[in-house]
Image (cartoon, coloured by chain):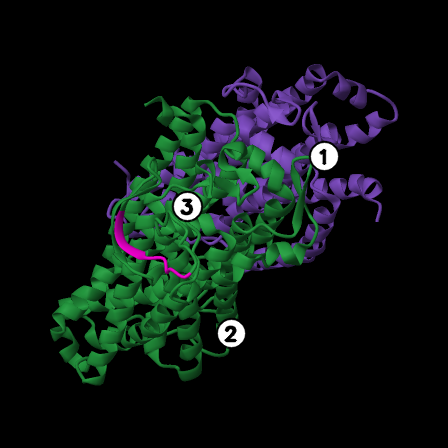
Amino acid sequence: MDAWLDPVLLSRAQFAFIAAFHILWPPLTIGLSLVLFWWETMWLRTGSAYYYRQARFWTRIFVLNFGVGVVSGLPMEFAFGTNWGPFSIATGNFIGNILGFETVLAFATEAGFLGIMVFGWNRVPAPMHLFATGMVVLGGVFSAFWIMVANAWMQTPRGAVIVDGKFVVTDFLEAIFTPDLVHSFTHMFLACIELSTVVMAGFGAWYFLKRRHVDFFLPMFKFAALATAIVAPLQIVVGDLAGSALAEHQPAKLAAVEAHWHTNPPGEGAAWSVIAWPDTAAQENRWALEIPNALSLIVTHSLTGEVKGLRDFPPADQPPVWIPYYAFRVMVAAGVFIALLAIWTLVRWRHGQLQGSRVCDQRWLMRAWIAAIPAVYLALEAGWFVREVGRQPWLVYGLIRTSEGAGTLTTGSVLWSLSGFVLSYAVIGIVAFVFARRIAVEGPDLQSSLPRRWGYKPAPTPAGSVSSENERLS
Amino acid sequence: MDASSTLPMLATIWFLIVGLFLMFYVVLDGFDLGVGILSLFVKEEARRGMMMNSLGTVWDANETWIVIVGGTLFGAFPLAFGVVFQALYIPVMLMLFGFIFRGVAFEFRHLARREAVWEWSFGIGSLIAAGAQGLALGGLLQGPSVEQGRFVGGPFDWLTPFSLLATAGVLVGYTLLGTTYLMIRMQGTMEYRLYGLARYLAVAMLAVAAAVSLWCPFRYAWIFDRWFSLPDFYYYASLPALALFAFTMLFRSLAQRRTVAPFVWTLLIFVASFAGLGATFFPYLVPGTITVFEAAAAPNTLVFMLAIVSFFIPIMIFYNAYQYAVFSGKLEEYAGSGENQSH
């Protein structure tokens, strides 16, 4: 019981909680901003009201999502200082530098152009508005890039040496482009796209089940389903590559993810377990449902390739097993479900089942797409649990232990702040969900007049009057 | 490049850059938070809504400056970042909670059936965030206990009469900024009332500024020596002189019912006070214990960051200014002032 009141454990729980909550929001911001940019470009090129109205409808979801993302991101940055001071002091020469870049080069850009993107219709020339949307896209993507640079360096630190307990960078390029970065950034970026296309398709499916705005959402649904059919299988391939890279750079993490205790002897393949009961004390699985040689095949792409087992690492250096093991399986199951769903949708599409109002009769297909929304969020969360719990017991892999990075705080302080975060995030998470649903129920605005596309004249609206994307029409 | 000779210069440059970012934050989000605090005293719901609308396009960009301060402080002065926020744990967390409820209110209000809930969330969130910043400022100025680069004090060390005084100063100062900002954006009866309020706030701010200025040389002997030695006295005296001048001009512009001038003079008061604090405490980041030179990152990190960030500073200032220019002008007075009374 007292172990739960250890301030270090509470700090870990707090960081895990605020990170797990925060990661729910930026992927949709990033993926959706790209789609918004595409629609706005098409609107300017073709003048088709469809693109404009899609952009305006999804901007409402975008802004709601963005707001929660911003306020939940701020505590993350401060948590490095408040709870992880020794870690910040030790790694500031690199992680601090990179977070500084993220804020100045990326986050500020996104915030600086967001106002124009959301409120600037009819107030700035159309090309300027498109430019602002583009800068929001770039800001989001580069934010994700720099964050992944910092995180990848914690997984596979390179280009720095420890002098007097502090990392000093010896080669910035090497430190930025660590072995983990290419896989992990690609995986995260594809996750942003996949999550956004699944949310779009899920919204469309919801309208089809209600038989509302079918003509308006059908092209969007097809676009989103097609994009998912491309991205979801690609994501599985990238995930597999990332897994193979783990074998080389973070073998203990891989072993935990697979609850693989014994290194397979030469000439014998390692089995892959579908499910298992890992027992850390006994250093083996109590039972497991296994497919012979499959783990060797997945990891090394050979039937008998060697995969290091957890027993090769002293218990003090082993990550927890249960969370990475089951989180990984949840992620894979959700990812495969979404890929199959998208492909199944393409098959139906080819058979003409998505034409006109017929799409509304595809009840189960549409229900599956709605279910895909929680599934894709679950995959996202599970993926981060695999990545971060699997990194334990290290903060900087192999160099700084998590326990060494924590500041000295009292139990009361951290318990208080953790409770505060749980309460606040529960409130804003639930409210955001209710309001997103409200936007869906209200549906798109198909009536209001279209703005001028090219050439700009001051709008007849009174100067200074600014209405939010989400201001209700009265 | 000889690291030992360039480090003091690099650390000083970064002190100025982070200070510049922090000043941008204080004056820009300062008026946001001030408007939020003011909104708590406004009865008519429609008027509170207008006050929020006056910030809708800019609050996010303004709040971003503190994200930038956090990021660059972490990169340029890791030791200060790792020690200060731990010492000020409770005020920092309070500030974050305030930010959360202030920030979500802008979008949530438009989607809510009961807008008043989120108007309160905006006002109370602003008050908590601003108050927490005052506590943090007071806690920092009185010097957290640090030994060998580790915070060794208790969780409530920041809570003293002085930090309460600093909090009063921040609350009054932000509210003054918010009041003078609204003079630019609002018209009609609201605007009229603001001038009377601004005068009281300015007097209160002058009193707190004077009290803090008196406290500093008595708390730290080295500040006393620094201020009251010739010829340094003349340099240091220039900043309070500038602030006094700005106060005088502020009262004048209020009497003349000027639209933009009161905000500009209030900004100048903030700039002078801010520069005064910086000049008084330099080279300390944590008064008495950690200097910018001790806290600074390695020279190669400082150079790398400087090369990239200094390139972006003018760009950031430009697009922020552009966003202000796009959304400038007076907000329309709402129709029917009495019909939207809150409960």
- Cβ atoms under marks 2 and 3 closer than 8 Å: no
Dot 2 amino acid type: Pro
The chain letter under disc 1 is B
What residue appears at the point 51 percent right and 65 percent down from the top-left corner? A132
**Quadrant in the picture for the C terminus of chain A:** bottom left
Q: Is residue B152 left or right of residue A38?
A: right
Chain appearing in green on the rendered image: A
Q: Are marks 1 and 2 on the same chain?
A: no
Q: Where residue A118 appears, x then y in whole percent?
A: 43, 61
Mark 1–mark 2 distance (CA, rounded to whole Å): 45 Å
Name the N-terminal-most of marks 2 and 3.
Answer: 2
Question: Can residue A339 be seen in the rendering of this structure?
Answer: yes
**For the point 65% across and 58% down, which residue is it?**
A173
Quadrant of residue A273 within the rendered picture: bottom left
User: Mark 2 = which residue?
Assistant: A127
Q: Residue B132: give x, y in percent of width and height.
A: 49, 30
Q: Which residue is mark 1?
A: B292
Instruction: Please give the label number shown on residue B210.
Output: none
Q: Residue at (36%, 48%) from the top-left corner?
A: A324
Q: Position of residue B78 (x, y in %)?
A: 63, 38
Chain shown in purple: B
- Do the CB atoms of the residues marked 1 and 3 lie less than 8 Å apart? no
Q: Nearer the viewer, residue A409 or A237?
A: A237
Q: Is residue B168 left or right of residue A429?
A: right
Q: Are marks 2 and 3 on the same chain?
A: yes
- Does residue B61 sit above or below A282 in this rendering? below
Q: Is residue A379 left or right of residue B232?
A: left
A214 w.r.t. A473: above or below: below
The disc placed on residue A310 is 3
- The span picked out in magenta is A267-276
